[in-house]
Image (cartoon, rainbow, N blue to C red):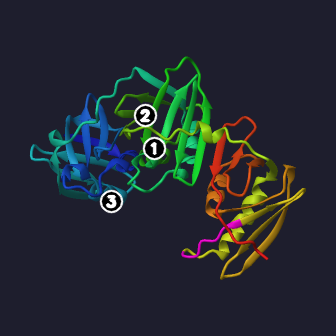
Amino acid sequence: MKISIRKSNLLQGINIVSKAVSNKTTHPILSCILVEAAGGVIKLTANDMEIGIESYVDGTVIEEGKVALEAKLFSDFIRKLPDSDITIESDKDSKTLIKCERLEFNIPGKSGEDFSNLPVVSKDKFITISQFALRDVINQTIFSISDNENNKLMTGELFEVSNNKLSVVSLDGHRISIRYIELKGDNSDIKVVVPGKSLSDISKIMNGGVDDPVNIYFTDNNILFEFDNTTVVSRLIEGEYLKIDNILSADYETKVKINKREFLSCIDRSTLLVKEADKKPIILDIKDDVMELKMNSIVGSLDEEIDIVKNGKDLMIGFDPKFLIDALKVIDDEDIEIKLLNPKAPCFIKDEQESYIYLILPVTFSTVA
């Protein structure tokens, strides 16, 4: 194999596929990036058997072939090269020569024939949304997945298509995040659980806007994302996701409208009083036209008031401040509505169109004097 490629193009491709390189494996080939030149195009591939990524990069194919190169050494070296054209050449024993200006670098490679191809995914069931929308949906839900591998389903997100609407759900036992997107066309009903790590990786490598599409294909075992010159295939998580319909239909007796930025700033200030080992709730004391926010810890205390519009009963309720901050940070609305029932029932934060819903469980607290 022999190719010529601009450093910036190669590095962009390496950065994309590196998300699928295995850092901990007993199979050395999984820690490699496959460089393949065929049919006049150059393709980079990485595959850790849970997620696989292919990306085409602009360059010139001088001689067809393929070689697998150790990802960290390859990417670190390319990163340190001058901003110029690079020639990569490998022989029949996979020994690889990298040239850039007056520099030559030799590294051992592995046979490209030993590299695991990405699984073939049927393209019968699919949806199309914008890259901007998908990135937005992931960023607005990913923080609610669990990092506890004992409950594998909670480490993923539910992607469900019904009545031409996509709903994306994440939960960790203390909170639930939901985003809805109206789809165009006539779409088949779909219900799968996608690993959170795969979604996080996708959100980092997608750069497109509202006019740049991403096609998402679904099978029983895999999900495939196609956008720009990149393909991402991820295994799905098996099992039945928690049914949340009954939780979402819960009633409320208190409704609060509040300025999001002011609310977020106050909660953020309160976290200065919370040390890692000393988790303290922030207490919301909701009255007619004002919400009093209270925090009391070994570091100090905070007492701040915010103007609100309230309908219903007065209420005092406590929350983990981090959970509130995570949700508020990803909401773009200037004003938000919070719906509550009692100090032991979850609160709902949602917009009028219900394009997003955040459910957060309260925590117990002792009354602040």
Q: Is residue 174 above or below residue 168?
A: below
Q: CA distance from mark 2 to mark 1?
A: 9 Å
Q: CA distance from mark 1 to mark 3?
A: 22 Å
Q: Write down the residue under mark 2.
A: 225
Front in this rendered view, residue 264 or 280: 280
Task: Classify mark 3: helix, strand or loop.
Answer: helix
Circle nearer the N terminus (2, 1):
1
- Res 308 → quadrant: bottom right
Q: CA distance from mark 3 to mark 2?
A: 27 Å
Q: Residues within 10 Å of mark 1 (few under 14, many from 20)?
A: many
| Residue 13 in sight | yes
Queried whether the magenta region covers residue 214, the answer comes back as: no
Please report the bounds of the magenta region as a residue range: 277-282
> How far across and down, in percent of the image, does residue 253 sit?
79, 47
Q: Write down the residue under mark 3.
A: 76
> How far across and down, in percent of the image, does residue 267 sit?
71, 64
Circle nearer the N terminus (3, 2):
3
Disc 3 or disc 2, which is closer to the eye? Answer: 2
Front in this rendered view, residue 313 or 159: 313
Q: Amino acid at mark 2?
A: Phe
Q: Is residue 45 above or below residue 38?
A: below
Circle nearer the N terminus (1, 3):
3
Q: Residues within 10 Å of mark 3 (few under 14, many from 20)?
A: few
Q: Write down the residue under mark 1.
A: 202
**Which of the numbered marks, if any, corresponds to residue 314?**
none
Residue drawn 24% across the image and 47% down it: 88
Residue drawn 76% across the image and 56% down it: 261
Q: Amino acid at mark 1?
A: Ile
Task: Classify mark 1: helix, strand or loop.
Answer: helix
> How far across and down, in percent of the image, does residue 85 sit?
34, 48
Tag 2 near tag 1, CB within 8 Å = yes
